Image (cartoon, rainbow, N blue to C red):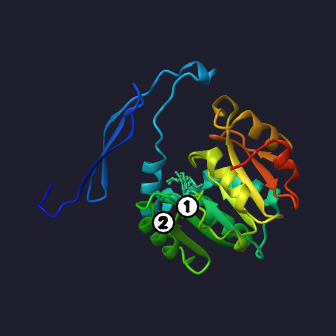
Amino acid sequence: MQNTQDRVKIFALGGLDEVGNNLYVVDVNDRMFILDAGMKHPGEELLGVDAVIPDFTYLIENKAVKAGFIYRMASKYYEQAIESEVTLADIDEKDHVLCIGGGICPFSAILIHQMTGAFVTVIDNNIKCLPKAKKLVKRLGLAEKIRVLYQEGDSSTIDFSQYTVVHLALQVSPMEQVMLAVEKNMQPGTKLLIRRPKKQLSSIYSSLTEKLLSFCPYACHKGRNMGSTVLYIKPETKALVKEYGLVA
Ligand SMILES: C[S@@+](CC[C@H](N)C(=O)[O-])C[C@H]1O[C@@H](n2cnc3c(N)ncnc32)[C@H](O)[C@@H]1O
């Protein structure tokens, strides 16, 4: 540390309510140092998984917003997935897309806009993500096309009448609660893209939701954390939702 003006943040990205999976970060004036990073042995619920490692997304996104080449490399990771999501939901420049869970570096929102010309609003419930996300969008010259807001994904204050497509990031939490609240509040005909984890990690939905989603078309994402994206289109009548007793 140089002087008393230095800003030091110490936080954990894993290992707090669990044994293993440690990831402690010391952030000095936006430079990050990792103190400890450890894996965890998976429990019975993760059959087929050899080791659980901490989630490095926050660190990668922090690097990506600062360095153009890391942004471009990390963006590649999302490209194919976004291409198949855009095709699945047939998104074009007339759409207004709401991306729930943009993070520090809203790759998905940016790529959706770049591939389709659609106006995108991206929200996150972590206020700390906002300044960096807004700065990146501005740096890319997209501030007129991508709006970044601080908002809860299942908030009743979201005006769904303006959105034709809603996109849920994989790490949105609690996923099922957010998904059901969005489904309840969005207009009939609105398309909902729901990213789903690989099969062995997919216990985040109840069996009722699994049944509802099993009717929907989907796109598979090979070799990624995300297993697939499901497209749910809200019916004119709520018959399907009622049949399965899904109420937010
Ligand atoms: C790590 S990001 C991943 C998104 C990735 N950058 C992308 O472009 O697809 C996931 C974000 O979802 C946000 N998030 C999780 N649950 C949420 C919720 N209920 N409402 C809004 N944002 C949420 C987290 O704060 C986190 O920043």
Residue name at image x 56 percent, y 56 percent: 101
Q: Position of residue 86 (x, y in %)?
A: 76, 60
Residue type, numbered disc 2? Ala
Respond yes or no on whether mark 1 lies under 8 Å from ligand 1: yes
Q: Quadrant of residue 87?
A: bottom right
User: Farthest residue toward the bottom?
Assistant: 144
Respond yes or no on whether mark 2 lies under 8 Å from ligand 1: no
Q: Position of residue 81 (x, y in %)?
A: 70, 51
Residue type, numbered disc 1? Pro
Give the number of marks: 2
Q: Which mark is residue 199?
A: none
Residue hosting label 2: 133
Inter-mark Cα distance, 2 to 1: 7 Å
Q: Do we see residue 151 in this rendering?
A: yes
Q: Do we see residue 216 in this rendering?
A: no
Assign a secondary structure to mark 1.
loop
Residue name at image x 56 percent, y 47 percent: 173
Residue hosting label 1: 106
Instruction: Give whichever of 96, 67 is nearer the camera.
Output: 96
Q: Quadrant of residue 44?
A: top right
User: Farthest residue toward the left?
Assistant: 3
Q: Could you classify mark 1 by the number of other residues whose Cα lies within 10 Å: few (under 14), some (14-19), or many (20 or more)?
A: many
Quadrant of the snapshot with the N terminus: bottom left
Instruction: Give whichever of 76, 90 is nearer the camera.
Output: 90
Contact between marks 2 and 1 (CB within 8 A): the answer is: yes
Residue name at image x 78 percent, y 60 percent: 191
